[in-house]
Amino acid sequence: MVSMVKLSPSRANDFQNCPLLFRFRTIDQLPEPLSIDAVRGTIVHTTLENLYDLPAIERQLPQAYELWREAFAEISQNDKYRELFDAIEDISVWSNESLFLLDKYFALEEPVLLEPTERESHIEFDLQDGFKIHGYVDRIDVAPSGEIRIVDYKTGKSPREGYEQKAFFQLRFYALIIWRTRNIVPRKLRLIYLGDGRILEDSPTENDLIATEKKIVAIWKAMEAAFDSKNFPPKKSKLCDWCAHQSLCPEFGGTPPPLPLP
């Protein structure tokens, strides 16, 4: 079986949480039902990306509302999402809840004072022996001093106490790529949780990123072993409640489909 040659934070998390889910998503590429919350996240991310196309003085909340409406109008015309929107009992309530996330954003940051260097930027690094790590960064800010801040928007709520550091795996993953490709350790990692209006920040060190690199390599080696043995066991947890593939999971009495031929 041919293994992966690129690894993103989301696929690394999938494998850690449940190797079988990783298999379903990456190898079998099984379809999953669309989520209205995920669509909300897509529209809000698009709105915030487009907001910074405006001159600084125009980056006000009413303009953000208008950008949201434009992004919503575009995505709602896509047949892929039409049935999902039709199922919403009250679209005006859903829209107002989405716009409220923009209210939260403007309470946390002042877009008129920010000039992001990069938005929705794809970054990657050849970690070893043709194994690449990559990802898409919501925002990269570079100060006049050259210091780098990596920013990620989350439309959900922040993690409960004790789980904050786990939430930073994605941004440390990105920070490692930037350090290895630009020879500078990002000064700040910022997670912006719009669901409860909270910002979490971390200041990684070289040792932190070396530890992240070791963790990624360990995940990769475990993946290689799974590919070689063709064994991707399920891992039952609370996350199973949201899994779309329970009917195929042995933990729930299901049987996975045969592995695709290489």
Image (cartoon, helix red, strand yellow):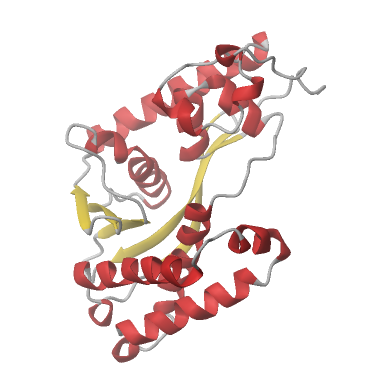
Residue for point 30% across, 51% down:
184
Percent across and percent down for residue 160 are 21, 38
- Residue at the right extreme? 261
In percent of the image, x 38 and y 86: which residue is there?
63
Side of 118 relative to 21 (left or right) = left
Whether residue 4 is visible here, answered yes or no, is: no
Quadrant location of residue 244?
Answer: top right
From the viewer's perspective, is 183 left or right of 72? left
Q: Quadrant of the N terminus?
A: top right
Looking at the picture, does residue 135 appear above or below residue 63?
A: above
Instruction: Provide residue 71's location: percent of width, then percent of height.
Output: 53, 74
- Looking at the image, residue 243 lies above or below residue 63: above
At x 69%, y 14%, the residue is 255
Q: Quadrant of the C terminus?
A: top right
Q: Quadrant of residue 117?
A: bottom left
Which image quadrant for residue 208?
Answer: top left
Spot occupied by residue 222 in the image (x, y as percentages of width and height):
51, 16
Which residue is at the front of the view, 58 or 248? 248
Question: What is the residue that sits farthest to the front in this orientation?
Answer: 89
Spot occupied by residue 39 in the image (x, y as percentages of width and height): 53, 58
Left or right? Give the position of 105 relative to 51. Answer: left
| Total tally of numbered discs in the picture | 0
